[in-house]
Amino acid sequence: MDMHIYRIFNALGDSIITSTYFKKFGIKRVFYNRAEFKTLNEVMELYGVEKPKFIQQSNRIPKTLVPYIVEMKEHKVPLLKLNVDLNPQEYVTTQLSTKTGPDRAMNLKEAEIHNKKSYEIKNVSQSKTIPDLISLLKESSRHISIDSGTAWLSSSMGVETFVISKNSYYFADAYHYMSYLQIQKKTKIYQQHGLGLRIPTLEEYIKASKDNNISVGSYDDYYKKVLRI
């Protein structure tokens, strides 16, 4: 089976999702326009995924990763499981921000709400490599994160994962990512209203974008992209 995608990003979450798709649907060839393979290659090796043949194309491929995410959500495809021995200690891990997408960031107080046992909090920013992240997460009692690669990693490891997703209220792609992540075991998604993923009202859409200093398009466009109509 072939896969067609415009761009492969050098991103941990995307790499875990893409590797899951490769494995589930037996992808043998990937046609693409642009690609950064470093993280994807590392993830495929970690998760034991056979590397497909990558074929670069000059004509633009319109398809992004989102339709594949929607397909896996519809088929309730579990993320590939990273087989590690979990040994939860009395600490929780957090990722509060990322260099890209500052509108996703949260502050420590927002994370502490989900640290019910007042465990020590360790920020994953201290981990510079994927193996470092795995070592930290496998002893975490809970990972509290923004929408980030570490959320996908911890979920695939079987660590209890709480994701605070702010931009899914106004960014349709983020909504689809969270919709898929939400069906994974031991994973909960929180938006501005609280637990669970839902489509915001027009007023919530406008307020969320203003609160995060983001210029957005029309609510109708967001709504149609979320429902894929």
Image: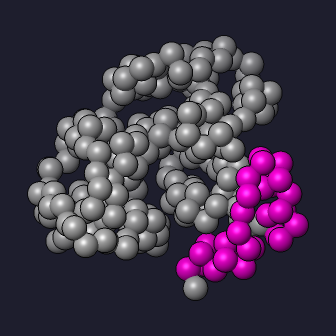
Q: Where residue 197 sits: x, y (%)?
A: 68, 60
Q: Where residue 65 sits: x, y (%)?
A: 40, 62
State the quadrant of the N terminus: bottom left
**Magenta region: which residues?**
201-228
**The stretch drawn in magenta includes residue 211:** yes
Q: Residue at x 42, y 24 (%)?
A: 133
In this view, the residue in front, 7 or 17, is: 7
Q: Against 185, is 124 above or below? A: above
Q: Residue at x 74, y 25 (%)?
A: 108
Q: Of helix, strand and loop, which mostly describes the magenta segment?
A: helix
Q: Against 140, is 187 above or below? A: below
Kindly tell me whether residue 140 is visible in this rendering. yes
Q: Residue at x 71, y 69 (%)?
A: 217
In this view, the residue in front, 90 or 229, is: 229
Q: Count up the numbered dots.
A: 0
**The stretch drawn in magenta includes residue 127:** no
Q: Against 175, is 161 above or below? A: above
Quadrant assignment, res 107: top right
Q: Is residue 176 left or right of residue 63?
A: right
State the quadrant of the C terminus: bottom right
Q: Residue at x 27, y 62 (%)?
A: 33
Q: Where residue 141 sits: x, y (%)?
A: 57, 25
- As drawn, the residue found furthest toward the front would be 58
- As drawn, the residue found furthest toward the bottom would be 229
Q: Where residue 208 sits: x, y (%)?
A: 80, 55
Kindly tell me whether residue 3 is visible in this rendering. no
Q: Is residue 152 left or right of residue 199?
A: left
In this view, the residue in front, 149 or 214, is: 214
